Structure formats: C-alpha cells, structure tokens
Image (cartoon, rainbow, N blue to C red):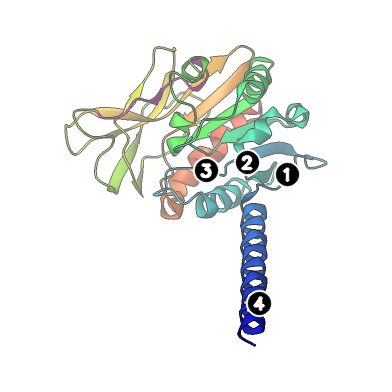
Amino acid sequence: MTRLSNAFGRRVSCTFLLSAALLALTTLQSLAASNTAQPANLEPPPEGTRVLIVTGIDYPGHPWKQTAPALQKLLEADPRLKVRIAEDPNSLASPLLKQWDVVILHFMDWETPGPGPAARENLRQFVAGGKGLMLTHFACGAWDNNEWPEFKSLAGRVWFGANGGRQHDPHGKFTVEIADAEHPVTKGLAPFETLDELYTCLTGEASIRVLAQAKSKVDGKHYPMAFVLDYGQGRVFHTVLGHDARAYAASGVGELLRRGCAWVAGKPPTP
C-alpha cells in the first residue's frame, strides 16, 4: 500500500510540474508576442501632402505615445497635411518610404541601437533626392554620433550631452523669439511663450539658418529652437521643441511646426 501511495504521489507531482512548466511557457510566449512590434502600415494617404511621423522609442521622460498624436493633430490643422504615425523606427527601411513627402523623426535610440544601415541609407536617399525631413525635440539624438556620423550632417545639429553639467534649462516657461523674420517659415510670426525644455546641448558644423531662438535663464545665452538646412536636393526643418503634450499647446508652437512641415514639402508655409 505504501509503495502504491508513493507511486501515486510521484505521478501527481510530475503531472503538476509538467502543467506548471507548460503554463510558464505559454505565459512567456504571450509576453513575447505582446512585445513584438506590429508591422507599420506605410501605405500613404491617397492625396494631400503625405507626412509620416516615425516614433516608437524615446527617453522615458518623453511620452511619445502622447506626443505623437498631439503632433499629428497640431499639423493637421493645416488641411493640406495628411499625417500618419509609424510606431517603429525600423519602418524607415521600407521601400514605401519614397511614396511620402515628409518624414518626421520623433524618436531617440534610448538604450537600444538606432535603425540599422538599410534604414539609414533609405532615409538619406529620401532627403537627398528632394523630399522633406523634420525633427522634433529629442530626435536630435535619434542616432548616436559614433553609430551614424552622417546623421550630424542630415540633422544639422545633434545631441552631445552636458553643457557645463546640463543638457537643458530646468523645465518651465520661456519665450521663443523669432531670429529670422525674412524666412518664409517665420515671416510674420510673432514671438510666443511655451512650456518646454530649453535645449543647450546641440553640436554640429553643418551650415544652418536659425529661425527661432530662446534665451537661457541659466547662462543668459541664446540657443536655437528651430533652424533649417538643405541636404542634397531636400529640405530639413529641425526644432528642439516638444518635450510633452503640453509643449504643443502654445499656438505659436503649432504655427511654427505647421509652417516648417509645409516648407520642407516644398509648399507655401501657410495655406
């Protein structure tokens, strides 16, 4: 009887362990599936100026799941701009990219490599061939400087880290001044107040034209908030504004970004 009881106990124990192992395996498979990025739909809108926001990863303090839709809504206040969101930076490698008019970089390679060689070359050819590129906030760090050196030429200025121990002024309100009132993007645009991070940490040697700037409350120096440059036959509009959804609330921010987006697409900045 004891021998039978022991055998039965071992059978129950083995059955329990097998069930537990299968449950754990199923759970891990489910988690893996939930964390796998879904293929982005890169089919462009049938008409209008086709604008693709590429996002999906950033420093945790930059809530891209909130800011990407806020940016889309802000841009679509110009009825010419038809905006879609791709939540995977590797979408830049897609052959469908060439069907878009403007790509907006809205990501940063936080603790992971930026998109690989195929995506980088596809984006470079996209802009050099005559399309538009726009960068917002921490997209100045979309690729590490050593990872893709050409990004510095494409973006005009890139993130390099601390400036005297800081990357930006403390988050708060500041005034964005118009530095170039003759450029089509900023012509007639008035200074405006925003709630954001005033970046003081960009570097680069590319020839840029500063359109808007802000004065640091820490060191009293002016830093570019928006600038433009040419890359091959394409146009680039780069703004470091856009820390969170509140940063897009100021009417001046919306107007500046809409104009910049239309301009890189080769359209008049205002409808």
Is 64 or 195 nearer to us in this picture? 64
- C-alpha span from label 4 to label 2: 54 Å
Quadrant into which the C terminus falls:
top right
How packed mark 2 is, by other alpha carbons closer than 10 Å (few <14, some 14-19, many 20 or more), is: some
Examine the image and state in which quarter residue 9 appears.
bottom right
Of tags 3 and 4, the one toward the viewer is 4
- Measuring from the top left, give residue 164's x and y in whole percent: 18, 28
Considering only order in the chain, which callout, 2 or 4, is on the residue closer to the N terminus?
Answer: 4
> Badge 3 is on which residue?
57
CB contact under 8 Å: marks 4 and 2: no
- C-alpha span from label 2 to label 3: 8 Å
Identified at 61% across, 74% down, the residue is 13
> Is 42 part of what is drawn in magenta?
no
Q: Which mark is residue 25?
A: none
- Measuring from the top left, give residue 7's x and y in whole percent: 66, 77
> Badge 1 is on which residue?
39
Is 198 or 139 nearer to us in this picture? 139
Residue 107 visible (yes or no) = yes
